[in-house]
Image (cartoon, rainbow, N blue to C red):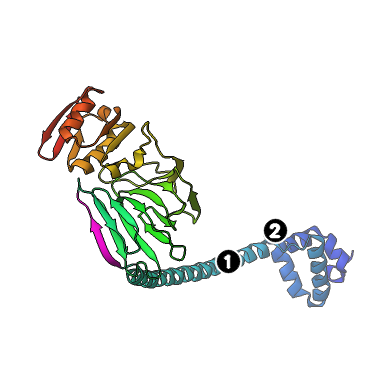
């Protein structure tokens, strides 16, 4: 019988207890071979060689105990590393946020100051409900300002640029000057023109804004759009449908839409060649197949009244009519002949019911 002290490498490898010792799968085998190695230092090189070969033959796998220990070590190191990375990441995020906030504050201040300097008002024209004004600008352009509107003329107008800001509705007949583009700024879109005639309706309290081209050529760009430019040809009308809630109407239009919805159509031309969208410039109210709710805002601005419906169904009533010098009482009386409703006028309040 060969003594274990005389075993060669192959002898150790074929021993099942040695295999379990190398694999770390049996505690008793591990204890036995650890004692054996201490007791037989002369076999240290052979046993080391056997362990090395076993490691290679077993697919470079460490013993279970070594694997567990290594796994724990890796986990702890990874956890510490992850914590460090997280801490570092949060530091980077915090620094980035700080930079963005600082840049944002600086940018807002810088842009605000430049806007105030570059787009400061030189003159402002306003109209009340029921009032309209004709304005002649320094470049010879004519502006008709509709009720409850304002037109701001920016400093430096007709020097290097021709820029105005409109809130409400106005009809522009712009003097041609190819070296100085005429710009109209509204809360929803900007318009660039050379010499043309067009109507802009952009009341803050209405659910849509629109521009109607009568002659010439204009380009438009939505203020909150993606930078795309719309070019209008004569007789075309572009409408921007707002996506925000309007406090006065308590309505939310298409909240899923990320940007205002835009439609392009032709203006409405009636029998006597009157353009419905610009009829107000001739002191006429042209109602063409419109519901009562749409007519409501027109009548309120025209007659300086506040109209309230007691039943939502009334808002859906549709009308086609023409008014010029009639009073609000006469207008409502005429509309009563088309749809059955009642109305009561108390001062500047009009209450409409079924």
Secondary structure at badge 2 equals loop
Dot label at residue 78: 1
Relative vertical location of residue 277 with respect to residue 142 in this rendering, above or below = above
Q: Give the range drawn in magenta.
A: 121-128
Residue 326 seen: yes
Q: Position of residue 30 (x, y in %)?
A: 71, 64
Taking the spot 35% from the left edge, 47% from the top edge, the residue there is 244
> Which quadrant of the structure image shows residue 297?
top left
What residue sits 74% from the left and 62% below the top? 61
Q: Check the picture and name the quadrant holding the N terminus.
A: bottom right
Residue 26 got which mark?
2
| Residue 171 at x, y percent in the picture | 33, 50
Q: Please tell me whether residue 280 belongs to the stretch shown in magenta.
A: no
Residue 44 in the image: x percent, y percent?
Answer: 79, 75
Bin the neighbour count of mark 1 within 10 Å (Cα to Cα): few under 14, some 14-19, many 20 and up.
few
Instruction: Examine the structure image and report whether residue 124 is included in the region drawn in magenta.
Output: yes
Query: Furthest residue to the right?
Result: 1
Q: Which residue is drawn at 80% across and 68% down?
A: 52
Judging depth in this view, the residue of 254 and 289 nearest the camera is 289
How packed is label 2: few (under 14 Cα within 10 Å), some, or many (20 or more)? some
When the figure is inspected, residue 284 is found, relative to residue 139, above or below; the finding is above
Location of the C terminus (image quadrant): top left
Check the image and name the residue furthest to the left.
347
User: Vertically, is 83 above or below 324?
Assistant: below
**Side of 223 where 134 appears, left or right:** left
Q: Residue at the spot x=32%, y=55% of the render?
A: 142
């Amino acid at each position: 019988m060969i003594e274990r002290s005389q075993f060669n490498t192959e002898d150790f490898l074929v021993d099942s207890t040695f295999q379990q010792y190398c694999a770390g799968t049996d505690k008793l085998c591990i204890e036995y071979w650890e004692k054996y190695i201490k007791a037989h230092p002369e076999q240290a090189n052979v046993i080391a060689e056997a362990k090395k070969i076993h490691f290679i033959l077993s697919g470079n796998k460490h013993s279970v105990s070594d694997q567990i220990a290594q796994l724990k070590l890796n986990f702890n190191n990874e956890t510490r590393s992850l914590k460090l990375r997280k801490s570092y990441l949060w530091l980077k995020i915090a620094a980035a946020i700080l930079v963005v906030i600082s840049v944002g504050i600086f940018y807002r201040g810088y842009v605000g100051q430049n806007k105030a300097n570059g787009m400061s008002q030189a003159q402002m024209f306003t109209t009340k409900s029921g009032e309209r004004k004709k304005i002649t600008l320094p470049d010879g352009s004519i502006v008709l300002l509709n009720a409850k509107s304002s037109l701001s003329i920016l400093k430096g107008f007709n020097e290097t640029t021709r820029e105005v800001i409109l809130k409400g509705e106005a009809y522009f007949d712009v003097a041609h000057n190819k070296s100085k583009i005429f710009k109209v700024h509204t809360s929803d879109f900007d318009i660039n023109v050379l010499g043309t005639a067009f109507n802009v309706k952009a009341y803050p309290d209405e659910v849509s804004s629109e521009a109607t081209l009568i002659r010439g050529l204009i380009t438009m760009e939505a203020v909150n759009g993606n930078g795309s430019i719309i070019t209008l040809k004569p007789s075309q009308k572009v409408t921007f449908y707002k996506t925000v809630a309007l406090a006065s109407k308590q309505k939310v239009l298409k909240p899923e839409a990320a940007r205002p919805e835009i439609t392009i159509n032709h203006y409405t031309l009636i029998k006597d060649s009157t353009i419905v969208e610009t009829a107000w410039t001739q002191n006429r109210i042209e109602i063409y197949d419109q519901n009562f709710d749409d007519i409501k805002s027109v009548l309120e601005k025209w007659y300086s009244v506040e109209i309230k419906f007691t039943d939502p169904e009334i808002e859906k009533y549709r009308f086609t009519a023409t008014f010029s010098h009639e009073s609000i009482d006469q207008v409502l009386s005429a509309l009563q002949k088309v749809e059955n409703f009642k109305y009561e006028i108390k001062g500047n309040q009009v209450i409409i019911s079924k």
